[in-house]
Amino acid sequence: MAHLNPNTYADAKHAAIACGSSGDNTIVAAVAGKRIRILSIFLVATDAVTVFLKSNATALIGSNTIRVPLDETGATGPAGFRDGDPIHGIGTGEVGKPITLNLSAAENVVGRITYIEVD
């Protein structure tokens, strides 16, 4: 994977995450001809839910069978999840596809994502 240009930080975009529907929730819209590279993500759930992050068919964090558990009580998993790599990114989506957060149940998940658009 290529290293990011130091000027890339000026191009970083940030978006709030607020979703609660079971299944796929778009958290970064598709950009024609570009891929979305995630630099960091932070998630917090208001109740027990499992999640994974994907771009179309490409799993970026977790997968449909290996999901990340979140639980505000801490009984079945941590209340929050944080990951980041500002040099390489933590995952790059497919060309022209959105980044989606898949929830196992209709529970509220909030957070923040930092990303760049790459060719």
Image (spheres, grey):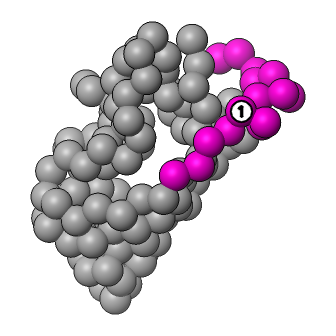
> Is residue 39 shown left or right of residue 18?
right
> Is residue 108 shown left or right of residue 93?
left
Q: Would you say residue 73 sits in the magenta stretch?
A: no
Residue 50 visible, this orientation = no
Q: Position of residue 21 (x, y in %)?
A: 16, 60
**Circle 1 sits on which residue?**
11
Q: Would you say residue 8 sits in the magenta stretch?
A: yes
> Is residue 103 shown left or right of residue 30?
left
Q: Is residue 111 above or below residue 23?
A: below
Picture quadrant of residue 65:
top left
Q: Position of residue 78 (x, y in %)?
A: 42, 75
The residue lying at 27 percent from left, 27 percent from top is 56
Q: Which residues are magenta?
A: 1-15
> In the rendered structure, which amino acid carries the disc numbered 1?
Asp
The residue lying at 32 percent from left, 80 percent from top is 46
Q: Is residue 25 above or below residue 45?
A: above
